[in-house]
Amino acid sequence: MPSLLEPDFLKRLGRLEIAARRVRRGVRRGERLSRRRGSSVEFADHRPYGAGDDLRFLDWNVLVRLDRLMVKLFHDEEDLAVHLVVDASASMSCGEPAKLLYGLRVAAAVGYVALAGQCRVRPAILRAPDRAESPGYLRGMGSAERLLGFLGGAEASGPNALRGGLRRMAAEVRPKGVVVLVSDLMDRDGVDDALSALGRGPGDLYAIQVLDPFEVDPDLDGEFRLVDSEDGSRADVSATPEVLRAYRARLEAYLGAVDLACRRRGIRRMLAPTSIPFEKLVLEVLRTRGLLR
Amino acid sequence: MALAAPVVLLYFFRQKQQERVVPTNFLWAQALQDTRTAAVLRKFLRSLLLLLQILFLALLVLALAGATASLWTSGSTRLVVAVLDRSASMGTKDGPGGGTRLDAAKAALRGAIDGLREGDRMMLLAVDERAEVLVPFTGDRDRLLGALAAVEPRDLGTDLTEAAVLLKAQGAAAAGREVEVLVLSDGAFADPGGIEGMRVSYVPFGEAGDNAGITDLRVARGADGSPSLAVAAEAFGAAPLARTLSLRLGGDGRVLDARAAEAPAGRQAFVLFPLDAVPAGPLEVRLEGEDAFAADDRAFLVHRPEPPRRYALFGRPSRWLRDPGVFRAAMEGPPAPVADAAALTALGPLDLLICNGAVPDPMPSVRAAIFIDCVPPDGPVKAIGTLEYPPVIDWSRTHPITRHCEFSDLLVVEALRLDGVPAGGVLVDSPQGPLLAFVETPDRQSLFLPFDLDRSNLPLRLAFPLLLPNALDHFFASRRPGDDEDFLRTGRPLERALPPGAKMRVAPPGGRSVEVEAGPGGTAVFRDTARAGLYAVETPRGPGFAAAALLRRAESDVAPRPRVEAGGVVHEAAPESVRANVPLRDTLLLLAAAILLVEWLLWTRKR
């Protein structure tokens, strides 16, 4: 999808893979080493021999050297489910570039890496009140175009979709594996309740919070009427230093609350202001934060 | 209001909001909530700033328009009499900006006139020693201001008596309405009497208290008959008098004499200028140096040296009356008595005739006559018999003729019994009649000694050599009706004895000459002598001068009075009474600047 990811960038993505911390059993064998000991050729560990164990896996070298019966354990290879959940509420339409576009490109990049790694990728677009549009699981590089096409067709609209969309998604599928939530996580009621829909399972949960620089450091001066993109409410603001200070304090407190809610649910949250170049985010930040490697 | 419109428009233009779509504004709403108190204050300040700007503009416009505040706020219309002192002391230059007190009073009164409201009436009364209604009650400000502008200080004293009479008349005509009297003066006047039914406000003017001035002049003659000018000068206030008095020619100001005038503060210094060598004509006495009140630093007079007096003795010879010239200088006459009337007529006009035992027939016209043991037939005094050994019972000790004379031991063998002597003319009295009498008629001064000197002991008494000089001084040294004066005090009429219908032309100092005509009584009178200085006088007798001098001690004491009395009621200074309109320009400009400063502070605080 040229509009989301450039071909040169796709080549660079080909060298990356999803770095799931807690691999989940998939439904098909994949390229990922499962923690479940299996029949792959990659050694994992030893354990004392027990009656009934397959003698083919007895480690003869250990027996000879230590005179102990030890069975070799191998990593099982299985596929990995990667859920790409993108919030497409109207608030994501703001900014230059728009937060949604930025988030979609992030999701597309992660999805492309996942597809390249033989993972099953399930993209989903959250819409209010409780919709989670998704083409279903995609697998293999042949699905990359479909993935990018699906994501590229998303448009931001409507009120906040995080709570209802996540619940709907959770009701439709059990998001196991890696869940990457791309959203601005801006909800006047807080995101704690919405994030609870993701549960606290054994999967890897990531939240990429996309914010416009204006939200992080508003450069207002003068009298403004600020119109909420989602509900149309208005706030008359005299952009005085005092008000700006109060806003920054409120933003910091809100982001702190979001961070706390994420921590409670084992969600690794990454702040992604759109001022950070997208390539840098994917190639450096997501790798640094352990989503990609 | 029109000027405020752009400010308001600019204000709203400046305050126009920009609308901006943001992802969500709930954090902004919370931030605003957090700063609600500050926001309320800010909104208030925003409105306040607008108000302050409009207020600033309004104050600026008012200041530039010369706004004033009216202090006269009573509901009913007012009747105001402005009594403006234009006496000499109001010319003291101690007012604001080097102006005179009268300038300050006029400025204050202008404010009061400007403050007259619809229905108010004001009368303008100028006072010095007289009162003059410049403008009767009117609400016409222009008329009042025009009359006020023409008021100038005059070299006169202050006397509010006439003004009080006028005010009483106005009060009676006010038909029950209260008349407010504003007295604008330095307070140098005596109690003029009560002004009932009026609210009197005394508005004082003046700052200076120290002044020195010439307070009196007198041309005197010494014992030898030599004339001299006595000048009294005095310092008022705390400083002693230490100035120089100079005597100058009135024409070219050339200094003829100069003498120190020194006296402690509050005391008079008397300086004597001999006039023997001073030529006849106008003179000026000047107190050298400067002070705030200049009008009393100069005085003017006309030196008129006494002409030689011609005398004659008539009747029987007397060893006691051989030469009157020994008693007084400048007496000319034959040493021997004249025996008959024809010889007397041949002597020409006489000033003094001494008749001893006989009276010439006809009696010549003389200025003075001494009748010894005789009585003229044409006078009011008659001889109605004789007195033998009349005892002296009393004599006048105050009359100039009997001054310093002792008559208790006077012995007279026989004297004429005089009749027709007025009560004030008896100088030495006996039970039967006067032994010495002085009678003054329009054409003659007559001294009667109704006894033969040789039949009395008077020539042997000390009183005799005093009596005759006293009489001669009294005859000739004092002014007589018809004599030209040495000087007159300003405001006094200038009179010249002229034939009825004769013309007199007078040119006041710095003024246009005026012609007056002598009346049937034989006197031409010029009354407008309110200005001190030399007046050129031209009469059929020829050109001459008259001099007018201020010489008013009360005016020279220029210290402003904090209170005045009227009818025994003390009126304290009430300068605010005249401030009907207070000029607000400076106050408004100050306020505008302060508002500008406050606005700037609020604006920076808001930022």
Image (cartoon, coloured by chain):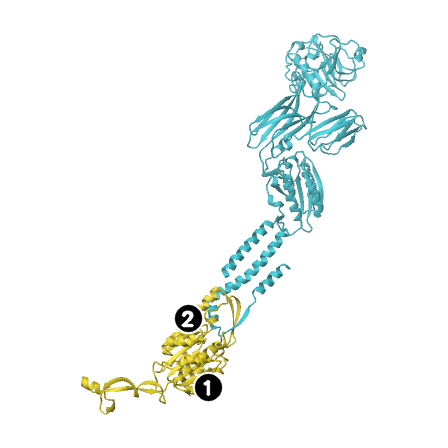
Out of B495 and B506, give the one closest to the viewer: B506
Tell which of B588 and B435 is nearer to you.
B588
Q: Report the residue at 53% width, 56% height from top.
A: B598
Instruction: Residue A220 in the image: state x and y as whole percent.
Output: 50, 67
Q: Is residue B243 depicted above or below A224 in this figure?
A: above
Q: Is residue B591 above or below residue A114?
A: above
Chain letter, cyan in picture: B
Q: What number is the disc on residue A76?
A: none
Which mark is drawn over residue A146? 1
Please state the total of marks drawn on the protein image.
Answer: 2
Circle 2 crowding by C-alpha within 10 Å: few under 14, some 14–19, many from 20: few
Quadrant location, the N terminus of chain B: bottom right
Secondary structure found at label 2: helix
- Earlier in the chain: of badge 1 and badge 2, it is 1
Subunit that carries the residue with mark 1: A
For the residues labelled 1 and 2, say whether their Cβ atoms are less than 8 Å apart: no
Q: CA distance from mark 1 to mark 2?
A: 39 Å
Disc 1, SS: helix
Kindly identify which residue carries mark 2.
Answer: A253
* Residue type pointed to by label 1: Arg
| B601 horizontally vs B178: left or right | left
Q: Residue B477: x and y, percent?
A: 69, 20
Where is residue A189? Give x, y as percent: 44, 76
Residue A225 shows in the view: yes
